[in-house]
Amino acid sequence: MPLHIPDPGRRSFLRGVLAGGGALLAGGALSACSQPIAAGSGRTLVRFWNLFEGGEFPILEEMYAGYRKENPDVDFRPVTLSWGQPYYTKLAMSSAGGRAPETAIAHMSRVTALGEGKMLAPFDLDVLAELGLHQKDFNPDLWDRASLTGGVYAIPLDTHPILAFYNLDYCREVGLLDGDNRLVGLDSKDRYLEAGRELAKVSKGFGYSQGGVWRTFWTFFGQAGGTMTIPRDNDSSALKMDADVAVSTLEFMKQIHDGTISPTVDGSDQYATFVSKRSGVLFGGTWSLATLRDTDIKLDAVPFPQVLEQPGAFADSHSFVLPFQRDVNEDDRRAAHEFVAYMLKAGTIWATAGHVPAYRPVRETEEYRAMVPQSHYQAAADHLFLAPDAWFAGSGSPYEDRGTQIFQASLLNQLSPEQAVDQFLRETRKQIEAPSPL
């Protein structure tokens, strides 16, 4: 297949991706995208790129085995690449260079950038309907985020909201369990703080392993009714954020991260603290189950408690996309749709990783309902607070990293909550005013 020179829109987008990501393993990224496409085998081709390393990889292998068995005539070639910005750089370069795989995984928070950058093709909804996939089968917030000018550019495989994983023994001792041993009682700011102090006495450490600052902020900001709207053009005056709600959110988070209720500094040791039984509740993403399932802690999990006015928690979604191909083979494109449908319908296998299947019919099966603790927190997928929607935002982005640094500085008393919100808004305006690569 000849190499096509990408059009100016894709070249400018690629410059933006590289500039936004800093030093992104340039040699590795270029070499991955410069690999020639192998000569055709005469079979339908489906190449699938993903970023599922670690504990999720063997689960994928199980799903692949079932797909291959049912589709022996498909030349199926999965590739797992490094998580984060390097992955998205390679995905963008593959599209810009005309060497994109038939399908790939992208976080839903990245779809705006990839879709508006013309790095993706829309799904054929008629084909998906033939395969049993319909809009009504998915969370409407995810479907809306995937819907851009020209069509639907992503189909969610899962949702991975922040949950409450809790030590049954500790929570029972302080009266936080109902008759079904579900976590209850964290239904106000005062009660949330009080319960954290009580759990700290029992654990002889902390009450909570609170989790990531960025995710915690958007969870409580969303529960308080806060909203943020980022304009699509370079007019930063059109940026809207409920600043007062953001300030009160950071004030509440400072009360939580007091060194007793939760550690003062956010870090990856949140898992070690919980696993070593030095905290009573871990507020972590669905992926935490892979780390926790083999411990000796008696634990369960439920959706993040509704502490404020609205239920919900920060979330993202691993979603299937169709990277842009200049020369589309219609048989391969159809096979890519069929692969997506197969993977969604095998959602109970994927749920063993901890993520909530995005395809509602899977969540309604007896097989899924029998999964514990997965079925105990599936309702979390109905109340999602998604990341800010902008080309420069999204999972693993420098914008997310910078926001985390600013919010963390407030928790460490290096900035007041008001100063932190002002600085975050200034950083956001800079991104908006920067030349857009889209």
Image: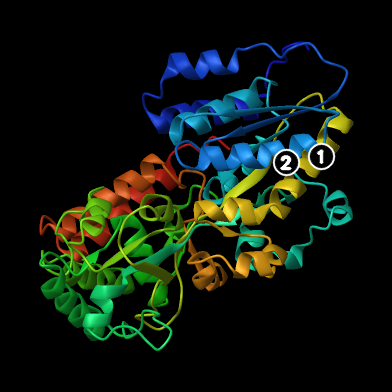
* Quadrant where the C terminus is found in the figure: top right
Instruction: Give the answer, above or below, for where 301 lies relative to 5.
Output: below
Q: Is residue 336 found left or right of 21 in the rendered image?
A: right
Viewer-nearest residue: 213 or 378: 378
Direction from residue 175 to residue 229 in the image, left or right: right
Q: Which numbered circle lies on residue 99?
A: none
> Which quarter of the picture shows residue 91?
top right
Q: Position of residue 294 (x, y in %)?
A: 37, 52
Q: Position of residue 348 (x, y in %)?
A: 63, 57
Question: How far separated are the C-alphas under marks 1 and 2?
Answer: 6 Å
Q: Is residue 97 above or below residue 382?
A: above
Q: Position of residue 167 (x, y in %)?
A: 29, 69
In this figure, which residue is indicated by the disc labeled 1?
70
Q: Amino acid at mark 1?
A: Glu
- Please indicate, yes or no, whether residue 136 appears anywhere in the rendered image: yes
Residue 338 figure quarter:
top right
- Residue at image coords 42%, 50%: 290
| SS label for mark 2 | helix
Q: Are marks 1 and 2 in contact (CB under 8 Å)?
A: yes
Residue found farthest to the front: 296
The residue type indicated by label 2 comes to Gly
For label 1, the SS is helix
